[in-house]
Amino acid sequence: MKTIRLHDKTFSLFIPYAEISSAIDRVAEKINRDFKDAPAPPALLCVLSGAIMFTGELMKRLDFDCTLSSIKLSSYEGTSSTGVVKEAMGLTAPVEGRDVIIVEDIVDTGRTVHALVDLLKKKGASSVRIATMLLKKEVYEGSIPLDYVAMEIPNRFIVGFGLDYDEIGRNLPDIYVIE
Ligand code: IMP
Ligand code: MG
């Protein structure tokens, strides 16, 4: 089994790129079906930094007109959630009157998406949907339904494909799990 070392920890290969790519194909198909007759271009909202790779892979599979904006939030320190969602950079474009699709790397406790949905509603978004590459289903405490989930994973700390361990590991094309 392929392993890598990041900072003080060892990670082993968990989801190879081919599998990630097929999962994104499937979720993109679903989004395409739902938005094919959208009256106005929806706004993809990339949640930086983790969702950057997923956003790129997802949007090239979408076949309807859409815009792209971003916001930077963080709640993790090291390998665990602090429980507090910090806004490091605000919305890069207004969302008033827009149909927004949040694009997230991973939903864990759900605090981040909940805070984001509240913010988008407050800022006047017409509708908000959530697309996430990964879901830690056992940990999700949220009440908001997650519209598009590419893959479900157990409650383990992972890195790669945009996700980091203290800011490194984001560039790995595959997903690795902590040993
Ligand atoms: P939540 O607010 O608890 O749902 O946490 C969501 C955010 O925490 C995600 O957007 C990630 O940035 C980060 N996160 C959660 N789980 C992991 C993980 O296993 N590895 C890296 N980052 C994670
Ligand atoms: Mg994130």
Image (cartoon, grey):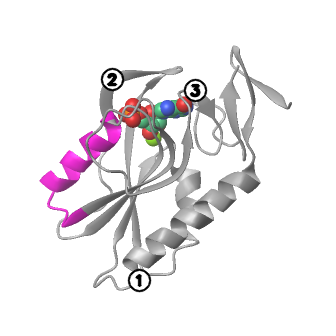
> What numbered label is drawn on residue 36?
1
Residue drawn at 29 percent across, 47 percent down: 90
Q: What is the spatial separation of the Cα atoms under label 1 and label 2, in whole angstroms?
A: 37 Å
- Whether the residue under disc 3 has CB within 8 Å of ligand 1: yes
- Please give the residue where the numbered disc 3 appears in the rendered image: 157
- Whether the residue under disc 2 has CB within 8 Å of ligand 1: yes
What's the magenta bit mostly, secondary-structure-wise?
A: helix
Q: Give the image location of residue 131, x and y in percent.
A: 43, 56
Q: Give the image location of residue 51, x and y in percent.
A: 51, 49
The local secondary structure at tag 2 comes to strand
Give above or below for 133 relative to 33. above
- Please give the residue where the numbered disc 2 appears in the rendered image: 83
The numbered mark, 1 or 3, whose residue comes first in the sequence reads 1
Magenta-colored span: 111-127
Q: How crowded is mark 2: few (under 14 residues within 10 Å), some or many (20 or more)?
A: some
> What numbered label is drawn on residue 65?
none
Q: Give the image location of residue 45, x and y in percent.
A: 38, 58
Work out whether residue 144 can be spotted: yes
Residue drawn at 68 percent across, 18 percent down: 7
Q: What is the spatial separation of the Cα atoms under label 2 and label 3, in whole angstroms?
A: 16 Å
Q: Are marks 1 and 2 in contact (CB under 8 Å)?
A: no
Q: How crowded is mark 3: few (under 14 residues within 10 Å), some or many (20 or more)?
A: some
Please state which of residues 68 and 143 is positioned toward the viewer in this rendering.
143
Which quarter of the image is occupied by the N terminus?
top right
Please state which of residues 177 and 84 is positioned toward the viewer in this rendering.
177
- Taking the magenta stretch, the answer to whether it contains residue 118 is yes
Three-letter code, disc 2: Gly
The local secondary structure at tag 1 comes to loop
Residue drawn at 38 percent across, 57 percent down: 147
Three-letter code, disc 1: Lys
